[in-house]
Image: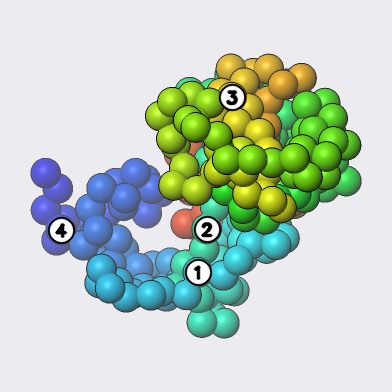
Amino acid sequence: MQNPQDPIVIGDPFAMLINPQAVLIAIEQSGCLGALNSRVCRPLDKPLIPKRDNEDQRTFEDIARVQALGAAGVQLGTPFAVTEEGDAHPEFKRVLAQARDDEMVEFTSVAGLPARAVGTPWLRSYLKIEDRLQAVARAKARCTKAFDCLAQCGLRDGLPGWGQFCIDNQLAAALRGDVKKGLFFRGVGELPFGDQIRSVHDLIERLLICQKAPLPA
């Protein structure tokens, strides 16, 4: 195991991730990383994590900016979902990486929460009949999959105004690359590397290290 006092190579993001103390040391030693705020959160703390409604939290400079406004951190999902190491089907990654903002569709998920996803054939077809499905929603005796993946489910519990589809079916279809039947949740805005599929290492480097020039393709 690395000694926390050992010098850390700033260009190696993984070394930083596996050694929290080394991260703090690196921040103190680096002018770039010094622009990011460090904070230790206890289990009952409620750190401020801003909601992501646009593409303003996907680079080192963006993260530094929102932290300067008082945020403890940022939330990222899609950039990691399309990395080379992800175990999803290549079509899953392609759909998310190439999707444009005008292809995004907003709706209410089966968990009753606001959702945004790529407007795939299944999602657009579902939304055309969503009102009718919600109008006849009734509680069912059992979960479609019989394992109750949600504590509250619009389909199983017959909740009006909530999504009326099996989330497991649609996410599984997306994971195996079925563009016609899958549900592809995605944030808005261009990803850090556009439509390129890059490694986690490249992504972490882009997020944690200020760049003098764009990373090579």
Q: Earlier in the sequence, mark 2 or mark 4?
A: 4
**Front position among marks 4 and 1:** 1
Disc 2 and disc 1 in contact, CB within 8 angstroms: yes
Q: Amino acid at mark 1?
A: Ile
Q: Position of residue 28 (x, y in %)?
A: 32, 72
Q: Is residue 109 left or right of residue 13?
A: right
Secondary structure beneath label 1: loop
Q: Earlier in the sequence, mark 2 or mark 3?
A: 2
Q: Amino acid at mark 3?
A: Asn
Q: Earlier in the sequence, mark 4 or mark 1?
A: 4
Q: Name the residue carrying label 1.
A: 49
Q: CA distance from mark 2 to mark 1?
A: 7 Å
**Front position among marks 4 and 3:** 3
Q: Name the residue carrying label 2.
A: 75
Q: CA distance from mark 4 to mark 3?
A: 45 Å
Q: Earlier in the sequence, mark 1 or mark 3?
A: 1
